[in-house]
Amino acid sequence: MPPREEGVTRLTEALFAVLENMRRARRAIPDAAALAVLQVIGAAQRDDASGGVRPSQIADRLEVHRSAVTHQLRTLTRAGYITAGPDPADRRASILTLTDAGRETVDRLTRQGKARFASFVADWTDEEITELARLLEKFRASAQAVNEKEPPPSARAAGTSVARIRSAKPTSRRESPS
């Protein structure tokens, strides 16, 4: 049985409100873009303590163009938060890792973020917090599975319009309407 429209509407409204609040909070943080890059590198090193991450992987994770990451990487390197070394698998590429100062900053940001989220649910029971986390994880997994089977309409439309543009015949100046 498909979900009732009323429930889906409430879910959608709640998720969009949470996302907007998070966007607003991020805009209020000085150097939020550089901090996001730092957190991506920190997460990669948590997953593999001996590893690092390529600049292209950071751009992919943040869903931005690779050139958007370059300035942040220079800023973080100059500030002493990250170092760049050659990628053993491809000497033309670089691998970025946190310095001790970078790791301390990521750890501090993680503690601050968790404390902030804890304040949001301070009057909740542990069971309520666990249930919300479980439901959000289930929602994320369901959304990922659906998106893998069928890309979102905006992605399909973009692909269609790109295909139309590519297949369209160019018109000469004489043929175009004036």
Image (cartoon, grey):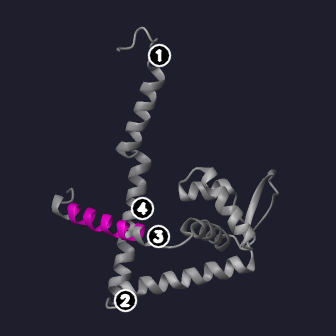
In 3D space, how far apart are the residues under numbered discs 2 and 1 (Cα atoms)?
63 Å
Q: Label 4: which residue?
A: 141
In 3D space, how far apart are the residues under numbered discs 3 and 4 (Cα atoms)?
25 Å
Name the front one of labels 2 and 1.
1
Toward the viewer: 27 or 166?
A: 27
Which residues lie in the magenta part? 8-23
Task: Using residue 157 as the reference point, say whether residue 66 is left or right of it.
Answer: right
In 3D space, how far apart are the residues under numbered discs 1 and 4 (Cα atoms)?
43 Å
Quadrant in which the C terminus appears: top left
Q: Earlier in the sequence, mark 3 or mark 4?
A: 3
Marks 4 and 2: in contact by CB < 8 Å? no
* Occupied quadrant, residue 133: bottom left
Q: Amino acid at mark 1?
A: Pro
Q: Secondary structure at mark 2?
A: helix
Q: Earlier in the sequence, mark 2 or mark 3?
A: 3
Q: Label 3: which residue?
A: 26
Q: Which residue does the image show at 36% across and 66% down from the upper left?
A: 20
Q: Is residue 153 above or below residue 103?
A: above
Name the front one of labels 1 and 4.
1
Q: Earlier in the sequence, mark 3 or mark 1?
A: 3
Q: Estimate how packed mark 4 is, as few (under 14), some (14 to 19) or many (20 or more) residues with alpha carbons within 10 Å.
A: few
* Occupied quadrant, residue 77: bottom right
Q: Which residue does the image show at 38% across and 51% down from the upper left?
A: 146
Residue 142 lies in the magenta-colored region: no
**Residue 167 x %, y %:** 46, 20
Q: Which residue does the image show at 47% across and 16% down from the upper left?
A: 170
